[in-house]
Amino acid sequence: MKKEFNHEKIKEAIRTIITELGDDPDREGLIETPDRVARMYDEVFEGMRYTNNEIAEMFNKCFKTDENDLVIVKDIEVFSYCEHHLALMYNMKCHVGYIPNGKIIGLSKIARICDMVAKRLQLQERICSDIAEIIQKVCETEDVIVVIEGEHSCMTSRGIKSRGAKTRTSAIRGLFDTDHELRKEFYSLIKN
């Protein structure tokens, strides 16, 4: 179930960081910063409160169907934070496809699943896998594909400073793994 973050401990930690960076956490512009950061973390790390199973339960709003044609939602914008540097992963677009197996999920629920999964300390590869796993659970289908493209500030604004470098990852399950024509169809449809 839902786990609350300890705002006081987060605020103390942020005050310590500000001090160790050489600034004064009690100066006018920074006085409220620890509280603002604690409240921001509540929002941007909301997904850390839930397991994949709990997210699947939250968004398990499906409808019965006899259709088994490819369903795609593309260009779902999310952001996340890299677990290696706590750096922002941005300009991220998720593309999700699945083949119904007697159930279809409300399209907005797919976007909500992507958003909740991204709101964790993450690796882009794991975001793909987590989304695929949750869609499989909710839709009771093995046939799921997730492709994500994003930029990582740990690469674009520090270190190598390779601005504009994009990372593409995918999770390919069921028929999308074995049926190369189906996979090609998915890739061609997300390009438009």
Image (cartoon, rainbow, N blue to C red):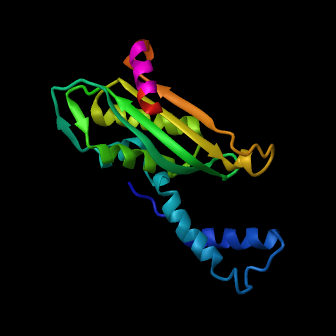
**Where is residue 15 shown, x and y percent of the image?**
71, 74
Which quadrant would the N terminus be assigned to in this image? bottom left
The quadrant of the rendering that contains the C terminus is top left
Q: What residue sits 76% from the left and 43% below the top?
A: 162
Q: Is residue 31 left or right of residue 80?
A: right
Q: Quadrant of residue 52?
A: top left
Please identify the quarter of the rendering in which residue 126 is found.
Answer: top right
Based on the picture, tell me whether residue 186 belongs to the magenta stretch. Answer: yes
- Residue 192 left/right relative to 162: left
Q: Is residue 192 above or below residue 51?
A: above
Q: Image point 35% across, 23% down: which residue? A: 143
On the question of residue 174 being in view, the answer is no
The magenta-colored residue range is 181-188
* Residue 91: image location, x then y, percent: 57, 48
Residue 135 located left or right of residue 23: left
Q: Is residue 44 magenta?
A: no
